[in-house]
Image: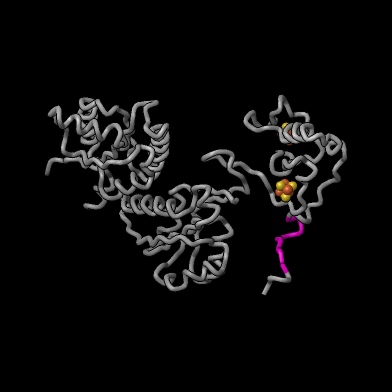
Amino acid sequence: MITAERKPLEELIDYVKPFKRILLLGCNECVTVCAAGGRKEVGLLASGLQMALLKSGSNIEIKQHTLERQCDPEYVEELVPMIDGSEAILSMACGCGVQQLATRFKDKPVFPALNTQFMGASERQGVWAERCQGCGDCVLGITGGICPIARCAKQLMNGPCGGSTGGKCEVSEDVDCVWQLIWDRLKSLGQEDRYVDIMPAKDWRSGGGSGPRKIIREDLAE
Amino acid sequence: MKKFEPVIVAFCCHYCAYTAADMAGSQRLPYPANVKIIRVPCSGKVDALHIIKAFENGADGVYVAGCLEGDCHFKNGNEKAARRIDYVKKYLEEIGIESERLTMVTMSAGMGYRFAQTATEITEKIRKLGPSPIKTAITQ
Ligand code: SF4
Ligand code: SF4
């Protein structure tokens, strides 16, 4: 899923201060799961903003709403009947959701309430870790199901750098050396030969190197 | 000026603090009427939203009372509550509310005296801090 964290309240206050009525908009998908921008976080932020603004002597009407998904036009369309009641939107979705709103509502200022972080997985309750960088040409089949692009600071493709010590990355003792993880796993799978094969330099055209990417499914696209 | 009487919301776990409050009552131990008790099934059930809403609606202080360490009826709800309180304290500071206005306490069901004493101490602490800045802003 896409992970995110709330921006500091101070930054958000600066965004909304010039307005009298805003729509605070959550998203029911990824950002709900990583406890950053779901219905509950919308409630928490609305109260926090309201109180902080009251303290500084201003009063803004904050309408709260949460869409099933902010990155799909079908759901964004639900906002049409209520959008005129607000002068601006503060979105608690990832950057994709924020941009979807900005595209649909041309005359409304849209602000991000979150800092979108990475594509990750939940390691345990309350802990999310980066797992994929969407390189467009997945090598997990060769690397034992562990990604050297998202999980190696240097994105090395053929084994560890000289900084790998005791299974840890030289970047931090808290980070596993991904090449150690890959080697251990290949060994336990009896696939050591995969490690010996040299992977060619990564072609980044599929990973965004040729500009913004788009998927068009001829059978589905209208 | 009218004397300031703080409004304090106490989220009390049914299995400890709420029963301790009963105990205090039956032992005729007085505690300040400022404390408004809300019974919850476990301190771990108290959400950040409940706490923030209490402040938004004019509470001067909030405390969450859970079971003693290792005694939670639902295994570790009290530990979760303690971590949540730390998290909400940081949010309160961001909003501009002194984080001392929020506290976590623990006690057992038999500690009627401790309940009354805690209620008194927290009421006094909040009285010294004065009205919550939100309440002040609302009345201005
Ligand atoms: S190899 Fe590429 S697609 Fe596969 S997990 Fe890593 S970044 Fe994602
Ligand atoms: S120690 Fe391992 S994970 Fe860290 S940069 Fe070197 S090869 Fe990559």
Q: Is residue B3 left or right of residue A160?
A: left
Give the total number of marks visible in the rendering.
0
**Looking at the image, which residue is at 67% across and 32% down?**
A176
**Looking at the image, which residue is at 40% across and 58% down?**
A17
Q: Which residues are magenta?
A: A208-217
**Looking at the image, which residue is at 37% across and 31% down?**
B72
Where is residue A177? Give x, y as percent: 71, 33
The type of colouring in the image is one colour
Along the viewing direction, whichever of A119 and A48 lies nearer the viewer: A119
**Looking at the image, which residue is at 16% across and 35% down?**
B32
Identify the image quadrant of residue A100.
bottom right
Image quarter (top left, top right, bottom left or bottom right) of the C terminus of chain A? bottom right
Where is residue A88? Give x, y as percent: 45, 65
Main secondary structure found in the magenta portion: loop
Where is residue A7? Give x, y as percent: 49, 49
Q: Is residue B30 left or right of residue B73?
A: left
Q: Is residue A209 magenta?
A: yes
Q: Is residue A67 magenta?
A: no
Q: Is residue A213 left or right of residue A42?
A: right
Where is residue A29? Give x, y as percent: 53, 55
Which residue reaches farthest bottom? Answer: A222
Along the viewing direction, whichever of B130 and B9 lies nearer the viewer: B9
Identify the image quadrant of residue A123.
top right
Along the viewing direction, whichever of B137 and B30 lies nearer the viewer: B30
